[in-house]
Image (cartoon, grey):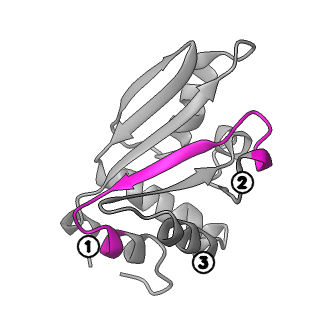
Amino acid sequence: MPQHELRVKVTLDATVSPSEDPARVAEALRNVVGGAQAEERAGAGSARLATEDERALSHIRDQLRDRHVRSAARRQLLLNGRGRTSSVLLNRQAAAAGVVAICGSPGESPLGPIRMTLESDRLQAAIDWLTAYAEG
């Protein structure tokens, strides 16, 4: 199923500690969605990026495939699903380096994780597409 039929909003949230540059945290968030168009907000205490650009979901899907973490992502997304939304934690240091890496707990990312939230009327289909092993 083409992802354009899914209509998924991807929101990324991260805390910004006083010793961090908010612009660098925002850059890590942008890395997660590749070249997708997104609304950004970064300042003292927190950073957020939100997008409905299809390229974001495709980039994340490619990263999950390339890193061989589709099953871990699927498990977390299904476990954390509530109605139209689900979330998973991503390693912030990996995101800063342009890599999408799943965290099993907040402690796995020393500066704090990035919370990626997916929102869709067809959440199950979105999770299935995002973590699929078959092409298509």
Mark 3 or mark 2, earlier in chain: 3
Mark 1 or mark 2, earlier in chain: 1
Cα gap from disc 1 to disc 2, whole angstroms: 31 Å
* Amino acid at pointer 3: Ser
Residue behind mark 3: 71
**Given contact means CB atoms under 8 Å apart, are the residues at marks 3 and 2 in contact?**
no
Quadrant, the N terminus: bottom left
Q: Secondary structure at mark 3?
A: helix
Q: Is residue 70 above or below residue 9?
A: below
Instruction: Please identify, in this view, whether the residue under mark 3 or under mark 2 is nearer the observer.
Output: 2
Cα gap from disc 3 to disc 2, whole angstroms: 16 Å
Q: Residue at x 48, y 41 (%)?
A: 12
Query: Toward which corner of the image does residue 20 lie, by quadrant?
Result: top right
Q: Position of residue 9 (x, y in %)?
A: 31, 50
**Given contact means CB atoms under 8 Å apart, are the residues at marks 3 and 1 in contact?**
no
* Amino acid at pointer 1: Pro
Q: Is residue 132 above or below residue 33?
A: below
Q: Residue at x 40, y 77 (%)?
A: 128
* Amino acid at pointer 2: Ser
Instruction: Please identify, in this view, whether the residue under mark 3 or under mark 1 is nearer the observer.
Output: 3
What label sits on residue 2 in the rendered view? Answer: 1
The residue closer to the viewer here, 36 or 13, is: 13
The residue closer to the viewer here, 67 or 114, is: 114
Residue behind mark 2: 105
**Given contact means CB atoms under 8 Å apart, are the residues at marks 1 and 2 in contact?**
no
Task: Report the magenta residues as a range.
Answer: 107-126
Q: Position of residue 98 (x, y in %)?
A: 63, 45
